[in-house]
Every structure is written in C-alpha cells, then in structure tokens.
Image (spheres, grey):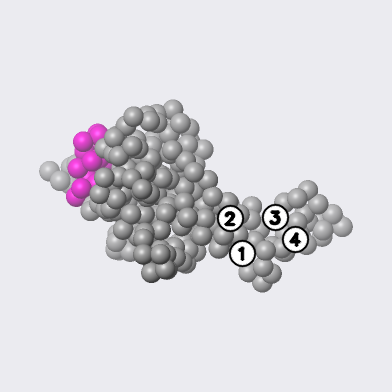
Amino acid sequence: MQGQAQQQAYDRGITIFSPDGRLYQVEYAREAVKRGTASIGVRTDDGVVLAVDKRVPSPLLEDSSVEKIHKADDHIGIASAGHVADARQLIDFARRQSQVNQLRYGEPIGVETLTKEVTDHIQQYTQVGGARPFGVALIVGGVENGEPRLFETDPSGTPYEWKALAVGADRSELQTYLEENYDEEADLDGGIQLALDALASVNDGSLLPSEVGLATIDAESESFEQFEQDHIADHLEENDLLDDGEEEADE
C-alpha cells in the first residue's frame, strides 16, 4: 500500500521526478496524443506535405469545423494530433511568434526557429506547478531559404526533425509504412501519394474526401496551400484510394 501511495504522489506532481527519473504527467500527455486521429508529414525536395485523418463523428457535424491542419505563416503549416483545444493554443502562440519575428526583424521566421519557440513554451509547462503539459503533438512543416523542413513537437518540449513522420493513433503502423516506402527522390505529388497511401493502409485501403485533410508548402513559391474536398477526391481517385461508397454516390 505504501508503494502505491508513493506512486500516486509522483503521479499528481508534474514538477516531481519519480525515483527512476520519469515525469508521469508528460507520459500521460503522450498517451493523450495516441488517442487523437493520425497526422502525417512528408518532406520532399519540392516541398512538404501534411495529411490528416479527420473523422467526423456525426453526419450532422460540419466537416469544416474539424480543424487539424493550420496555417502558421505564409510558408509554414502545422498538423496536430491529440487534444484539439491544446493544439489551438499552441498554434495561436506559433502565429504570434511568426508575426513578432516579422515585425522585429523584417523577415519571415525560420521553420526551425518557430518550432523551438513552440517547444520552449511547451517545456515550461513541465516545470511549473498548478499546470499540466499540453496533450498534443504538432507536425510543423515549411520552407526555409528554399529548403523544405519538417519537425515534430513532443509533450515534453523536445523538437525532432524528420524526413517523414506520423503522430497520433496507429503511429507505429504508419511509421513502419513510411519507413518502407519513403523515396528521397520523390516530388511533391509523390509525397502526397505516400501520405494518402499511408493513411489508407490503416483505414481498410480506402478514404473518404470528407475525412481527409491535405495541405502542401511548395519549395519554389514558399507558399502554404490547403486543398478543398474536390481536389482531395481527385488525388484519392488518381491513386485508387477513393472509398467505393463515394464513387457510387458520384455516379
């Protein structure tokens, strides 16, 4: 009983390390991320692709109100997995930092700089009593000096740079798929195909346009573009991933 009581004490305090060096609340925040629907980022020489699974829980819910991809700046996009409200707070913070950098230095913020600003903010919530960690992971993709960059933020406040990654539900399966099929010489369309194929691999091999979010940041124009449903449907049909029910409805 005494051991259980000690365990609960470390459980409740975000600022207290357990004897084996763990912060349990940060680990629980990572579990919250796993409960969120999947988000995928793919970096290519031509730009960055962000794709998300945004399942709509009710036919009465407006598809557009399910937001998992956000524009942080003209050249940076962010996809999230985990608690939506936490994601919105961090994305608002990222947008403010982007504008502060533009006003202070007269130039767009770097993708790595912005990611580290966000992760520094996240890390503060692992050291302050009376607060909890952010239960969300972000994929930050963008173009910096003509070079595509792709980062992940972790609830601990650690940034990681990737060529391709998945966060949220089914991460291990999606990551395995990306590792096996990633092509460093792929163009932007190839990156879109890989991201959609990966999402389909954990969704019975097909997808509905209304339940997929897709955006790109083009290396040449350094601009963020979020795709409409019709455009997503075209990509799904092109890659034989369009759900049969959707095809019949179109006919």
Distance from Cα at disc 3 to Cα at disc 2: 13 Å
Sequence-wise, which precedes: disc 3 or disc 4? 4
Q: Secondary structure at mark 2?
A: loop
Magenta stretch holds residue 228: no
Distance from Cα at disc 4 to Cα at disc 2: 16 Å
Q: Nearer the viewer, mark 4 or mark 2?
A: 2
Q: Which residue is mark 1?
A: 125
Q: Are marks 4 and 1 in contact (CB under 8 Å)?
A: no
* Residue type beneath disc 1: Tyr
Nearer to us in this view, 246 or 73: 73
- x then y, percent, for residue 123: 60, 59
Distance from Cα at disc 4 to Cα at disc 1: 13 Å
Residue 101: quadrant of the picture: bottom left
Please state the extent of the stretch shown in magenta in the rendering: 230-245
Q: Which residue is mark 2?
A: 157
Left-right relation of 182 to 62: right
Q: Which residue is mark 3?
A: 23
Please state, as top left, top right, bottom left or bottom right, where the C terminus lies in the image.
top left
- x then y, percent, for residue 76: 36, 54
Sequence-wise, which precedes: disc 4 or disc 2? 4
Mark 4 surroundings: few (<14), some (14-19) or many (≥20) residues within 10 A? some
Q: Secondary structure at mark 4?
A: loop
Q: Are marks 3 and 2 in contact (CB under 8 Å)?
A: no
* Residue type beneath disc 2: Gly
- x then y, percent, for residue 1: 85, 56
Q: Are marks 2 and 1 in contact (CB under 8 Å)?
A: yes
